[in-house]
Amino acid sequence: MMPRKLTNYYWRLVSLSLCLSIFDLNVIESCASSTSNSGLPQQFEQFETRDRPFWRACTPHPSLCVCQPCPFTMALPTSLTPFSFLLSSSLLAHLLLRIVTASETELLLQFKDSIENNHALSSWNQSIPSCSGEKSNWPYVQCYKGHIWGLTLENMNLKGVVDVQTLKELPYLRTFSLKNNDFDTSWPNINNLLGLKTLYLSDNKFNGDIPAQAFQDMKWLKKIHLSNNQFTGSIPTSLTSTPRLVELRLEGNNFTGSIPNFQHAFKSFSVANNQLEGEIPNNLRNMPASAFSGNEELCGAPLGACSTKKKSPMRIIVVVVLVIVALVVIGAVALFILRKRREQEPTESTENPSSTSQKKAKSREASDEGSHRSRASSHGSKRDMKLSFVRDDTEHFDLHELLRASAEILGSGCYSSSYKAALPNGSVLVVKRFKQMNNVGKEEFHEHMRRIGRLNHPNLLPLIAYYYRKEEKLLVTNFMHNGSLAVRLHGNQSLEQPCLDWGSRLKIVKGVAKGLEYLYVEMPSLIAPHGHLKSANVLLNESLEPILTDYGLVPVINQDLAPDIIVMYKSPEYLQHGRITKKTDVWCLGILILEILTGNLPTNFIQGKGSEWSLVNWVHSIVPEDWSKEVFDKNMYVAKNSEGEMIKLLKIALTCCEGDVDKRWDLKEAVNRIYEVKERDYDEEDNSRSPSDASEVDIKKAHSSESYWRRYPAPNCIFPKPRGLEPNNEVQTNLQQHFPTEFMHQIP
């Protein structure tokens, strides 16, 4: 037998465990923290009130912790029997089990272990907690008040089974994304994650039917993206009972049946390219037709009207029989007429030889006319093959006019071919022909091009129009007469196009940074909004302002070929871990700055994998004291007192190229550091104006003057006629001669 006083304390502790097991565990945590040095009698000094037993678990300061009312009352026994001891012990064990639950960090590690090919998550480990307040210590994890709020595991080639049971133990999880991975299982039981607000499972290989009640009780869901998977069966009807849903993307699957009667005010909705049928619900008829395209059996606005009559099988059989009979009769009549004409031909020939020749001529004319009609019909069937313009501030032209324009090839590779085309109205354009753009469907390609067309910034080359065909695509932009930064850095120089001085190079770097900053703001959903940043994709205008091109195209490039083509796939994080991050474009920017400052092509430093990465090693191999003499481009015009700022920019470039992604700056930090670099490098008598403020005409005049050569050392430039600027005396061709025959056969 226990002493009576100790027995009372024991039963009070049991009562507290019952109360706390029902309510929030945070209560006992606050009580424990406020009385860590108190004895048992002090901790449970007052357990009950007259009216409500076990109302609060009191400490020496009762106001610090309050237990909510328990829905039961219990008389405290004065003695402890074996049965009561077992019962109370089990209750205490239940309480301790709730306290000693797995931490969220351990849960994430458990989830990671359940996924195959999880190399991209190698930095997740037990030594560092996943969250510290609002800060996430692990990549791809979003935190809120020390809890895991979001998981964004995109573009990692993850596969296996989605362990929803583990994720269920994360009470604060609100957003979950597995976009663009390699999961090929059936529907995961997402309805266990009742607190989710956004769910992104697009671009995987999830398959099978989704249960009708898959989204039941998920009242907080706002965005659901399941596009480009292999789901079958009907669209889950439980989607109609998600009151906050504003985005639903189901395109590119194999859903069948009719569209549920949604009553939501969707901001984004698509069921394109499925096998749906029936009439489109009234509440969805304000959606664009593209949201329903690729479903042959769908009807109703915004598609064609539904047929009011159903043809019976018997009626169809009757129609088919009548058509066959009619064809037989027509054939018999035609044979009879032909035989009669043959019988009459000798007589007519004997009586009037000239009439026979006239008939033959008329026959040829009729044949020619029929051929003409056939060609016209073929032409009509191709009218839908036209350019799609994305801007209203340019004069429109048709595809046929563009292909007949005089043209010359600018460059060709496995990724694309570029042509300069001059239209009759004087406009000079660049037509880029892509063969490796089959990563998305037609509608998604159109939407992505329209999104790029809406971009508007002085340092971006605007897209004018595009042409879609399954096998290849055309993108049309303006022609920049000053060429690319790559040609300016590495091509033959001349007095018309002198070597770039320090001020001009700094101006180019800052312009590139501005363009990248704009892309990151306007295209936040892309992990690397440019993705293909290199000197050949930086064009220069007359004032040497940089113009970025080939931006935002990574999502539509074939993913099996992209690693051999696109610059971002040369980054250390992809070569080592097979992943792309928000800082990958920063690495590309750092490599570009090194190329601008050193004058060396990154491809000159190929040493196995990661050619551009070796350029960083080359700079690091030179001691900093010798950077001014050994690293910087000897063809770069440099005024006195510029060295400090040049070295500052070089250090910025090296930090942008940091191999450890966690140590690398994000884009905002990199851009701010670049903006801080000054020119401030001219003699006092000339400090009122710097070369980067002057036009190219001013620079040409200055470079050709005698005083300029006295101030600056003569650069090691070669001065033949500049390539690409002299008149082209070769025979001009038109654009269509550069395209294959099978492509031209599709053009009217």
Image (cartoon, rainbow, N blue to C red):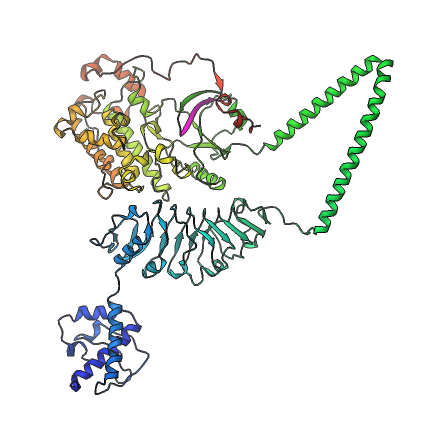
**Residue 20 against residue 687 in the figure, above or below:** below
Q: Quadrant of the N terminus?
A: bottom left
Q: How many marks?
A: 0
**Residue 53 against residue 609 in the figure, above or below:** below
Q: Is residue 151 left or right of residue 473?
A: left
Asked whether residue 215 appears in the rendered view, the answer is: yes
**Residue 5 against residue 634 in the figure, above or below:** below
The quadrant where residue 499 appears = top left
Asked if residue 641 lies in the magenta stretch, the reply is no
Q: Quadrant of the C terminus?
A: top right
Kindly identify the residue that appears in the image at 13 percent across and 29 percent down.
623
The quadrant where residue 155 appears = top left
Where does the magenta region start and end?
414-423
Residue 700, position in %: x, y? 29, 17
Residue 445, position in %: x, y? 46, 39
Asked whether residue 538 appears in the rendered view, the answer is: no
Asked if residue 421 lies in the magenta stretch, the reply is yes
Between residue 141 and residue 98, name the one nearer to us. Answer: 98
The quadrant where residue 704 appears = top left
Question: Main SS type for the magenta part?
Answer: strand
Residue 659, position in %: x, y? 23, 38
